[in-house]
Amino acid sequence: MQRRILLTGANGRMGTEMMRRLNSSSWSVTPTTRQTMDICNFEDVDQQISESDPSLVLHLAAYTNVSKSETEKNICWQTNVIGTRHVMRAAQKKSIPVVYVSTDYVFDGKQGLYKEDDCPNPTGFYAISKLVAEEAAMSVDKARIIRTSFIGSEWNFKAAYVDKFTSADYIDVIGKELMIYLNNIDQIDEKILHVATQRKSIYDLVIVRHKNIERGFQNSNLSSQPIDFSLDTSQWESVKLRLNDFEKIEGS
Ligand SMILES: NC(=O)c1ccc[n+]([C@@H]2O[C@H](COP(=O)([O-])OP(=O)(O)OC[C@H]3O[C@@H](n4cnc5c(N)ncnc54)[C@H](OP(=O)(O)O)[C@@H]3O)[C@@H](O)[C@H]2O)c1
């Protein structure tokens, strides 16, 4: 039987990337956007999920403006927390699994290589809202949480930090990892997984696609800034090793 996936936030950055991949895969896809399903409106969400009756929901829709969230707390909360509760509640009514995409920002960036069960310590409102939304997913049996981080292929700066660390990767690289996750979800039991790539400096990430980038330094003038948001991805690496032939069914 063909598997059916409903996406929230299908017009966003990762939504667009996942639509491109899912459309050329064996999944039947129902994309939803703010126009077709406002996650802040439970009736909207309930009706759309119930009518399209997917076998899986990929919940990407969010308020994602990290700096503006400090002054737009209400809309950020409504979208990320209340919206996620709506998606969880509607899916739970029909026993549909949901994959909720969360962020490395639930950690404070002081330590790096965070494991799935390390204590979160979000430092801004966006990150707080994503962490509270994780709790909405934690309380639903069939919901899962992926923590990740990604950048687009563009880099509009002269330099990139050599002293700031991440396990983020380019959106297409993370998109491919998400496809592996979705294609094999029936064989993945972990409630929370860090789906990203190995720890590296921002400079080492950017130089892969921007050969002339200069080395930038953060510590010298901003010593109080967090410097290491990297996620420990060893559980995800073990899951991939465990999966049979994941390359073959990745479907990218
Ligand atoms: N970017 C990162 O590095 C990163 C890292 C970790 C986790 N994440 C998470 O990954 C997910 C996707 O991120 P992204 O960067 O692709 O985000 P994005 O480009 O900002 O896309 C978010 C989408 O959510 C939609 N949306 C906002 N409010 C909505 C509402 N009330 N109802 C329905 N849709 C709504 C937006 O629609 P409009 O365009 O109409 O506003 C937009 O299409 C998010 O959950 C984000 O928190 C991102």
Image (cartoon, grey):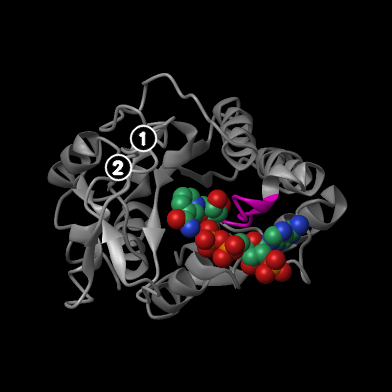
Q: What residue is disc 2 on? A: 220
Determine contact: label 1, label 2, CB under 8 Å. yes
- In the depicted structure, whether residue 98 falls above or below residue 57: above
Relative image position of residue 150 (x, y in whole percent): 38, 58
Q: What residue is disc 1 on? A: 223
Asked if residue 19 lies left or right of residue 250, the reply is right
Task: Give the residue drawn at x 30%, y 41%.
Answer: 219
Where does the C terminus fall, quadrant-wise? bottom left
- In the depicted structure, whether residue 251 falls above or below residue 148: below
59 in magenta: yes
Along the line of sight, the residue nearer the viewer: 100 or 97: 100
Where does the N terminus fall, quadrant-wise? bottom left
Q: Quadrant of residue 45?
A: bottom right
Relative image position of residue 112 (x, y in whole percent): 28, 32
58 in magenta: yes
Along the line of sight, the residue nearer the viewer: 187 or 137: 137
Task: Give the residue drawn at x 17%, y 70%.
Answer: 208
Helix, strand or loop status at disc 2: loop
Asked if residue 88 lies left or right of residue 187, the reply is right
Q: Quadrant of ligand 1?
A: bottom right
Q: Amino acid at mark 1?
A: Ser
Residue 84 visible: no
Magenta stretch, residue numbers: 57-68
